[in-house]
Structures are given as C-alpha cells and as structure tokens.
C-alpha cells in the first residue's frame, strides 16, 4: 500500500507546491514570507553565498519548490526523493539539467550507491529526517563517503522535550512518538540528535526559527559540521 506521502500530493492542484509536501497550517499553505524564513535558515547555516561555489545534495527534496529557492547560491544541485509523483513535479517545473536535477530513489539506497560522493560540498535534509527508518546509518554514510561535505543542515525536527506543546490534548504513547511511520515521525531531543551525530563523526549545532514562526514552539534545526 502506498504511504500517505505518496498519495496526498496527487490529490492537490499541480501548482500547490507547499500543500503537496504538507508545508501547511490547518491545511492551508504557509505564507511566502515564512518560506523565506526557511530559505534564510538554510543558506545561513550551510554558509551558502551568491558566489555559487557549492554543490548541494538535497535528501528528501520533495517537489523541488524549496530547493529552487536556493539555486542562485549553488554551482550544482542534486535532489533525491522516493515519491515518483513529487519528483515528476520537480522535473517538470524546477529541473535545470544537467547541473540542477532530481531523481527518484530511497535516500539510504542513494547515499550507498552514489558513484561520486566527493563532488558534494554541502547536504540538506529539510522536513523529512524524522521519517527515516535508519538515520544513524545515514549520518555515518554521509561522514564516511561524502568526504567533502563540510556541513549537513537538518531542518524542522520535532522536539521530544516540547511535544506537549503540539499535542495540547495530551501526549500520545511512546509507540507513536518513536514511530518513523507516524504523521510526525520520530520525536527526538536535542541530546539524542547530538549523540547520534557524534557517533557518526559530526559536531551538532542547534538553531531555532524566530519567535512567532508557525512551528517554532515545538521544532528545531541542527547543523552538522564535520569533526576535524
């Protein structure tokens, strides 16, 4: 059976980019100014500049609408996502072949199979890390194989220490909070992420969206920097 992530986007208009990836509040797409806050966080934490010298790998890129917002800071880009439909949208509306392209694939399978991992200088994973079944292995492979990737930005992580601010009618059980296949994915504390990163050879630096941002009260971001 297809997951909701694969089914839901097909039910929406072709240009409803934020709705397709559930970047919404009460079912309505977030505002463009909030997208810009996300873009600014990505470019700031990955140290992307308009000089365009970086080659970025986007893991779980969705339909490419967010990716496209940072193309002007990059020399080249490659995005991978396991939704065939979302990648079809990305290819149709945002692909700039051959240097800015998208591909269907499982994220873990891709990082294991990439033939030239050393070409990437930065890695982005926004809004999907909590859904990965084996994130520890993913971080280890990025450290071991993607040797020129100096920074990994993982955005929009649900904070286990603040889950009650999201579940206002009472916390669900640990079974749901630790289920990567649930609607939110796995809720993790900053300490859990820090320990996971350290085991894989990364230093973790945490950051937060500004007060008033629609989900800043229960989510955080982390930038992983390669240990010297």
Image (spheres, helix red, strand yellow):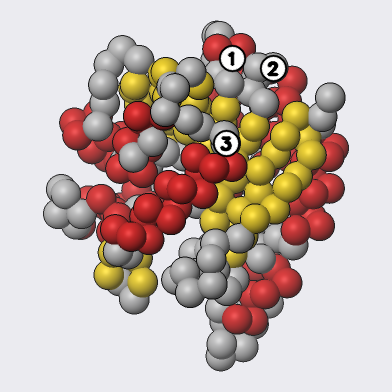
| Image-based side of 60 in relation to 193, left or right | left
Label 1 close to label 3 by CB (< 8 Å) = no
Residue 222 vertical position relative to residue 102 in the rendered view, above or below? below
- Residue 174 seen: no
Is tag 1's residue or tag 3's residue first in the polypeptide sequence?
Answer: 3
- Residue 220 seen: yes
- The residue tagged with tag 1: helix, strand or loop? helix
Is tag 3's residue or tag 2's residue first in the polypeptide sequence?
Answer: 3
Numbered mark located on residue 46 in the image: 3
Q: CA distance from mark 1 to mark 3?
A: 18 Å
| Image coordinates for residue 63, horizontal then vertical, percent | 31, 41
| Image coordinates for residue 78, horizontal then vertical, percent | 42, 24
Q: CA distance from mark 3 to mark 2?
A: 16 Å
Query: What's the residue at 56%, 90% (across, down)?
Result: 169
Residue underneath mark 2:
147
Label 2 close to label 1 by CB (< 8 Å) = yes
Residue neighbourhood size for the residue with mark 1, other residues' Cα within 10 Å, grouped as few (<14), some (14–19), many (≥20): some
Numbered mark located on residue 117 in the image: 1
Query: What's the residue at 84%, 24% (across, down)?
Result: 228
Query: What's the residue at 49%, 26% (across, down)?
Result: 56
Badge nearest the viewer, 3 or 2: 3
């Amino acid at each position: 059976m297809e997951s909701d992530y694969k089914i839901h986007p097909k039910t929406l208009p072709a240009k409803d980019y934020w709705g397709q990836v559930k970047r919404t509040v009460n079912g309505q797409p977030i505002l463009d100014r909030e997208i810009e806050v996300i873009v600014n966080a990505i470019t700031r934490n990955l140290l992307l500049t308009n000089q365009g010298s970086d080659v970025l790998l986007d893991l779980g890129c969705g339909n490419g609408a967010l990716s496209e917002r940072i193309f002007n800071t990059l020399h080249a880009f490659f995005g991978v996502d396991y939704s065939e439909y979302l990648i079809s949208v990305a290819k149709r509306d945002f692909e700039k072949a051959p240097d800015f392209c998208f591909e269907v694939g499982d994220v873990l399978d891709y990082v294991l199979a990439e033939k030239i991992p050393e070409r990437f200088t930065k890695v982005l994973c926004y809004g999907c890390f909590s859904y990965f079944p084996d994130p520890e292995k993913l971080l280890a492979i990025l450290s071991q194989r993607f040797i020129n990737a100096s920074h990994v930005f993982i955005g929009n992580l649900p904070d286990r220490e603040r889950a009650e601010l999201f579940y206002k009618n009472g916390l669900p059980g640990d079974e749901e909070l630790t289920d990567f296949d649930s609607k939110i994915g796995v809720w993790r504390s900053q300490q859990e992420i820090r320990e996971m990163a350290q085991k894989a050879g990364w230093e973790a630096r945490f950051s937060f969206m500004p007060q008033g941002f629609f989900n800043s009260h229960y989510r955080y971001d982390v930038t992983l920097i390669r240990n010297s």
